[in-house]
Image (cartoon, rainbow, N blue to C red):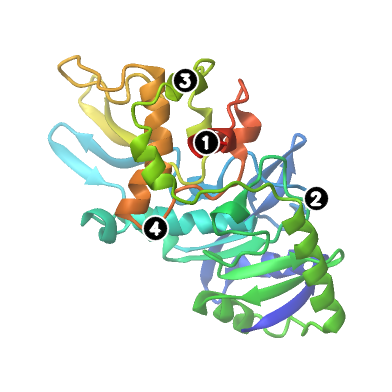
Amino acid sequence: MKTGILTKPEIQELFSSMITKNGEESRIFVPATIEGRVILEEFSPEREIFYDFANFLRPPKGIFFPQREVLCSFEQERAVEVPPAAGRIIIFGIRPCDARSFLFLDKIFSAGSSGFADPYYLGRRENSVIISLSCIEPSEGCFCTSLGGGPGDESGSDIVAFDLGDRLLFEAHSAKGENFIEENTTEFRQPDAADQNAKKESLQAAFNAISRISTDGLVEKLDDDFSDSFWEEITATCLGCGVCTYLCPTCHCFDITDEKDRDGTGTRVRTWDSCQYPLFTMHASGHNPRAEKKQRMRQRIMHKFSYTPRTTGDVFCVGCGRCVRKCPVNLDIREVIRKINGE
């Protein structure tokens, strides 16, 4: 495993030099502050990388799977496809839970899940380098350790970086990660025992701060509880706003619409959608199999904790806690799971 140490000013300099290197242009995304908010923003040499944050409000899935994306344009009967994006993408500073979520989206958008590969998602994803930043102070609502993750988890990351104060310790966990460090080997210094000890202490403190729930046997329990009255109870205050799905790093439902002008030209657009919206399952006949809130909430929970474990082998939740922190009526997915567990 290749490792290296860089100070924070050195990271700034490294990314500045990498925007265009060896004739290849790279889009680099880093944590930045915009009007007091911490967001994942495209890097420029004058933009200072920000480190003092728990996590982004918006998940990073939008880099590979944009909220609104034009797939093709058309004029009368002639369609012109929009080619998939080219060029390398480097994502720095996302948390390990979000890096892990990419592994789940990969299964959805690759040919392995449905037989159809999505060239738009894969065109960006395949030419990317993911450098996650380990958690120091997990947010209220985080429960990643209950789902196989952790504050320094390497799943989905090409490199995991550990914040040691004035410097970062980089550890490569894929061929892409090793190549990244190798390409910039003159910039990195080797970590010493003090660096490794600081890393271990930081990880242990973060691990101790994360809440835990049990997901043992959840698939079978959900099958038994499909018609249970508690679905009405937990959705009594739900607004159906969909914020839980839009902020979820693994939710991937979308709609495709044709937007046509009067002159016959137009575009075919893919946009995010949500299973929490009443029209999501509306049939052309007017019938809606999930007309009630309880049915839509049940679909969301069943999809993450029952259907995808059967179809992909994975629970489609990374425990980032965004839906816990940002639900306007304080619906807590951890409490839903505890109710299913009979706690």
Q: Earlier in the sequence, mark 4 or mark 2?
A: 2
The secondary structure type at the circle numbered 1 is loop
Total numbered labels: 4
- Residue indicated by mark 2: 52
- Residue indicated by mark 4: 106
- Tags 4 and 2 touching, CB below 8 Å: no
The secondary structure type at the circle numbered 3 is loop
Quarter of the image with the C terminus is top right
| Residue that appears at 41% across and 65% down | 126
Residues under labels 1 and 4: Cα distance? 33 Å
- Mark 3 closeness class: few <14, some 14–19, many ≥20 residues within 10 Å: some
Q: Earlier in the sequence, mark 1 or mark 3?
A: 3
Quarter of the image with the N terminus is bottom right
Q: Quick check: 150 left or right of 165?
A: left
Give the residue type that dot 3 points to.
Answer: Gly
Q: Quick check: 254 left or right of 94?
A: left
- Residue indicated by mark 3: 240
**Closest to the observer: 294 or 61?**
294
